[in-house]
Amino acid sequence: MGTDPGPPPGRDVGHPAGDRRRVILLAGPSGSGKSTLVRSAGLPIVYLDDFYKSGTDPTLPRLPELGIVDWDHPDSWDCAAALAALERLCRESRQELPVYDFAADGPHGTRTVEIGTGVFVAEGIFAPDLVGELGARGLLLDAIVVHRDRWKNLLRRAARDLKERRKPPGTILRRGVHLYRVEPDVMRRAIAAGCRPLDARATRAALAAHAGASRSRT
């Protein structure tokens, strides 16, 4: 996987013209440290996980072998709502966005996201689903998928989910093993959608470069 944080050929990652705001999509398997990498760059962040459907939604896909909702299936979130929110942020710079409570399997309140005139990051496992539409609308600055060791992702994910009490420990364990097995497919789909694969160090450098370019304009 890539270690060069520079822009991919053919993608416009220069300074946005005027105060045109654009999105950096950050994809990667659950537990790959996406949120931590964004925070280290100091960029505004939109958590795409906050657009999950409510746990009572009858359209939620399920994992029959585990007896739980398949939260990693694209039908488990509201892609249209996420896309509309990102487009409004690019246009208006400030939005009230939902906050998802994983323990309660549903939205719980809202938070205000302000991005000023620069760039911002939308991170989540479903970020690749937005590459095409954001690119077609001229709102995509970059798309990255974080590549890290699967075992480390497994351990980070388990520690996070247990600390936040997202689900019962048994469910966290069974889901963690399932995600470990399907992680190569997650990476392949993200790359096929147009995300460039970077390791953690290169991702951090790429985000820092975007942040620096954005600050130089303000």
Image (cartoon, rainbow, N blue to C red):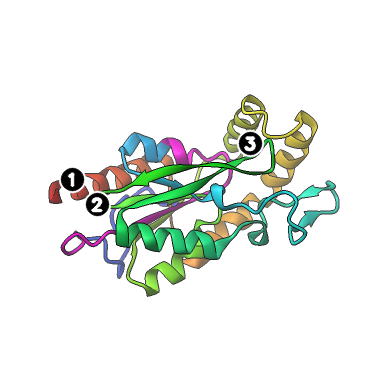
Please indicate whether residue 181 sits to the left or right of residue 83 in the image.
right
Kind of residue indicated by mark 3: Leu
Work out whether mark 2 precedes mark 1 in sequence or the reverse, and give the earlier one.
2
Q: Residue at point 70% right, 39% down?
A: 176
Label pair 3/2, CB-CB below 8 angstroms: no
Callout 1 secondary element: helix
Work out whether mark 3 precedes mark 2 in sequence or the reverse, and give the earlier one.
2
Q: Report the residue marked by disc 1.
A: 215
Q: Give the number of the mark in front: 3 or 1.
A: 1
Q: Which of these two is toward me, 71 or 54? A: 54
Q: Give the number of the mark in front: 3 or 2.
A: 2
Q: Residue at point 43% right, 35% down?
A: 36
Label pair 2/1, CB-CB below 8 angstroms: yes
What's the magenta region?
Answer: 15-36
Residue 89 sits inside the magenta stretch: no
Q: Report the residue marked by disc 2.
A: 118
Question: Mark 3 and mark 2: span between their CA atoms?
Answer: 34 Å
Q: Residue at point 58% right, 34% down?
A: 152
Which mark is on residue 154? 3
Question: Mark 2 and mark 1: span between their CA atoms?
Answer: 7 Å
Callout 2 secondary element: loop
Which secondary structure is most common in the magenta stretch?
loop
Kind of residue indicated by mark 2: Gly
Whether residue 117 is visible to the viewer of this picture, yes or no, is yes
Please indicate whether residue 2 sits to the left or right of residue 65 in the image.
left
